[in-house]
C-alpha cells in the first residue's frame, strides 16, 4: 500500500509541475525551428521583391542634325568677337543612343558631326535631361546638354553643345525611338 501511495504522490507531483509550465509553455524545438524558418522566409521575400518595371527602360536610338548655335552675351561685354564661328564645321547629321535603366538613369553615346561623346542623364515622368561629355576634346568633340520630352512613343528634344573654348556653339534637334 505504501508503494501505491508513493507512486500516486509522484504522479500528482509530476501533473502539478506540468500545469505550472502550461501557463508559460516553451515551444518544442521543432516548433521553434518552423517559426524561425517562416519568419526568415517572410523577411527574405520582402527584401527580394522586385521593383515595378519602368516602361521607359530599354535602348532608345535616333538621329540629330547639328547647326550653328547662337551665343547669348550680355550687352556689357565689349571684347566678344561674334564672327569667330563661320558655321561650317561640326554641322550635319549624327546619331544618339541611350539606354534607360529601370531606375530611370540613362547612359549613352553620341557620334557624327559633333564628334564622339558620352551621355549621362535621367528620365523622370516624361522629361529627359542629361550631360554630354566629349570622348576626346582634341578631335573636336563637343560637350553640353541634351533635353527632351517623352510623348507618343518618342523622346524629342534638343542638344546644345560647345567646343572647348565655348566660341563654337552647336544646336541640334533630335528624336529617339525605343528599339
Image: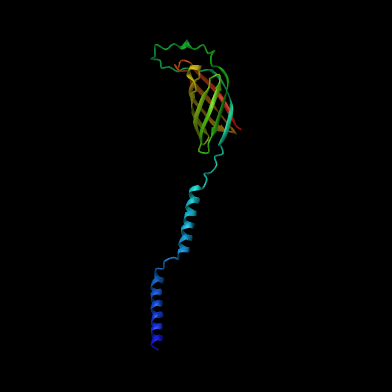
x then y, percent, for residue 4: 41, 86
Quarter occupied by residue 172: top right
Foreground residue, 165 or 6? 6
In this view, 152 is above or below 50: above
Q: In which quadrant is the C terminus drawn?
A: top right
128 and 93: which one is in front? 93
Residue at (52% x, 20% y) in the render = 171
Looking at the image, which residue is at 38% across and 83% down?
6
Q: What color scheme is it?
A: rainbow
Q: Residue 88: percent from the left, percent from the top?
A: 54, 12
Q: Where in the figure is residue 131, as x and y percent of width and height?
A: 48, 27
Picture quadrant of residue 112: top right
Which quarter of the image is occupied by the N terminus? bottom left
Please identify the residue farthest to the front as the structure is shown. 3
Q: In the image shown, does 116 or 55 lie closer to the viewer?
A: 116
Question: For the view shown, which residue lies furthest in the right direction?
Answer: 179
Q: Which residue is found at the position 46% from the left and 15% from the top?
A: 167
Number of marks drawn? 0
- 88 up-or-down from 15: above or below: above
Across and down, in percent, residue 37 comes to 48, 57
Amino acid at each position: 500500500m505504501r508503494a501505491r501511495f508513493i507512486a500516486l504522490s509522484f504522479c500528482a507531483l509530476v501533473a502539478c509541475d506540468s500545469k505550472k509550465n502550461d501557463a508559460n509553455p516553451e515551444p518544442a524545438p521543432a516548433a521553434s525551428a518552423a517559426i524561425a524558418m517562416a519568419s526568415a522566409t517572410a523577411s527574405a521575400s520582402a527584401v527580394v521583391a522586385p521593383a515595378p518595371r519602368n516602361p521607359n527602360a530599354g535602348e532608345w536610338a535616333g538621329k540629330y542634325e547639328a547647326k550653328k548655335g547662337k551665343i547669348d552675351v550680355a550687352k556689357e561685354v565689349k571684347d566678344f568677337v561674334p564672327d569667330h564661328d563661320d558655321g561650317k564645321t561640326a554641322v550635319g547629321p549624327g546619331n544618339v543612343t541611350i539606354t534607360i535603366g529601370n531606375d530611370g538613369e540613362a547612359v549613352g553615346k553620341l557620334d557624327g558631326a559633333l564628334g564622339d561623346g558620352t551621355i549621362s542623364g535621367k528620365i523622370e515622368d516624361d522629361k529627359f535631361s542629361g550631360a554630354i561629355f566629349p570622348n576626346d576634346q582634341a578631335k573636336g568633340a563637343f560637350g553640353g546638354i541634351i533635353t527632351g520630352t517623352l510623348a507618343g512613343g518618342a523622346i524629342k528634344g534638343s542638344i546644345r553643345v560647345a567646343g572647348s573654348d565655348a566660341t563654337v556653339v552647336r544646336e541640334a534637334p533630335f528624336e529617339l525611338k525605343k528599339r
